[in-house]
Image (cartoon, grey):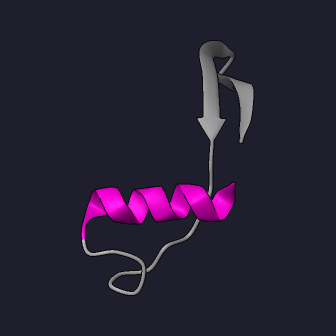
Amino acid sequence: MKTTLFEFMGKDMGNITLSLGISQYPEHGSSIAELMRKADKAFG
């Protein structure tokens, strides 16, 4: 996970956080919440 300051057209938009993991339906879960948990686990 990485947090960085985001600027757009010269204006400070604040911090953004990026977390990237992959999960696949239905192999890794049958609900959005379960797929998100699995993607977070795959990233970490």
Along the line of sight, the residue nearer the viewer: 17 or 28: 28
Choose top left, top right, bottom left or bottom right for residue 17.
top right
Placement of the N terminus among the 4 image quadrants:
top right
Choose top left, top right, bottom left or bottom right for residue 13.
top right
Q: Is residue 42 magenta?
A: yes
Q: Position of residue 31 (x, y in %)?
A: 25, 67
Q: Is residue 5 above or below residue 1?
A: above
Q: Is residue 39 magenta?
A: yes
Residue closest to the far bottom? 27
Range covered by the magenta-colored residues:
31-44
Q: Position of residue 27 (x, y in %)?
A: 40, 87
Q: Is residue 4 above or below residue 18?
A: above
Q: Is residue 44 above or below residue 6?
A: below
Q: Is residue 15 above or below residue 38?
A: above
Choose top left, top right, bottom left or bottom right for residue 12.
top right
| Chief secondary structure of the magenta portion | helix
Q: Position of residue 44 (x, y in %)?
A: 69, 54
**Residue name at image x 55 percent, y 55 percent:** 40
Q: How many marks?
A: 0
**Residue name at image x 32 percent, y 85 percent:** 26
Along the line of sight, the residue nearer the viewer: 24 or 28: 28
**Residue name at image x 63 percent, y 42 percent:** 18
Q: Is residue 13 left or right of residue 24?
A: right
Q: Position of residue 7 (x, y in %)?
A: 68, 22
